[in-house]
Amino acid sequence: MELRRADSSPAGGVWLNFVNAAGDVVGGGLASAGGQRARNVPAGEVNVVWSDAAACTGGIGLNVEADRTSTLRESLPMGRLLELRCPAADCAGEPLSFLSVTTESGAEIASHLTGAGEGVRFSDSGSLGLGCVTPGSYGISFWAAGRRWGAEVSVSSSRPAEEPVVVNGREAGL
């Protein structure tokens, strides 16, 4: 695996997790100063999830073929803060009891987001900062106030990095 920053420099120090289709971590570690990480990964569907101070959190799915060596090259553009919102009348002060955030390729990254820890609550205005994500499209599902909510969002790097991407949750039912 070779990781590069938006300016094409090596993305050293990025934490990587290799997750199989069952959701089990099958490997991980830090990318070298040169932005590289070698890993024998079991054959099948695998998600590579990265966490990086500059590019934030993101992931990509890939199909690993048995007895085959391949190289994955990924560019990590500057990420953006993600803010989850729910109507204040419903979610103000409520705990977030479940969160799923998936990338376009199906990589589940919720557990890697800094603001999605255990015991987090929505603010009095119904907002919750989830952390920073790499540009791309995400599907979001969460439980709060005894109901399921959902949203889809496209995160772009074209806006100022300090301006959060607001995700307005819609009641999704069961």
Image (spheres, helix red, strand yellow):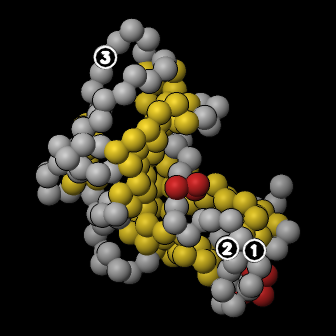
Which secondary structure lies at badge 1?
A: loop
Q: Are marks 1 and 3 in contact (CB under 8 Å)?
A: no
Q: Earlier in the sequence, mark 3 or mark 2?
A: 3
* 13 relative to 167, above or below: above
Above or below, 16 against 154 in this view is: above
Query: Who's the residue at 29% across and 43% down the image?
Result: 31
Badge 1 crowding class, 10 Å Cα cut-off, few under 14, some 14 to 19, many 20 or more, is: some
Residue type highlighted by circle 3: Thr
Question: Does 70 sit above or below residue 32?
Answer: above
x and y percentages locating residue 94 in the rendered image: 77, 79
Assess disc 3: are there few (<14), some (14-19) or many (≥20) residues with their C-alpha within 10 Å of its C-alpha. few
Image coordinates of residue 89 in percent, x first then y, are 78, 87
Instruction: Determine if residue 127 is in view.
Output: yes
Identify the residue at horizontal 75%, vertical 74% (top origin). Answer: 95
* Corner quadrant of residue 173: bottom right
The residues tagged by marks 1 and 3 sit, at their Cα atoms, a distance apart of 45 Å
Q: Which residue is mark 2?
A: 120
Question: Is disc 2 placed on a helix, strand or loop?
Answer: loop
Instruction: Examine the rendering and report whether any part of residue 48 can be seen.
Output: no
Quadrant housing the C terminus: bottom right
1 and 2 marks in contact (CB < 8 Å) = yes
Say which amino acid is labelled 1.
Pro
- Quote the CA–CA distance across marks 1 and 2: 6 Å
Q: Say which residue label 1 marks.
A: 95
Q: Amino acid at mark 2?
A: Val
**Residue in the picture at 60% in, 77% down:** 128
> What x and y, as percent, mark residue 72?
30, 32
Residue, disc 3: 69
Query: Residue at the spot x=49%, y=20% of the render?
Result: 42
Left or right of 172: which side holds 135?
left
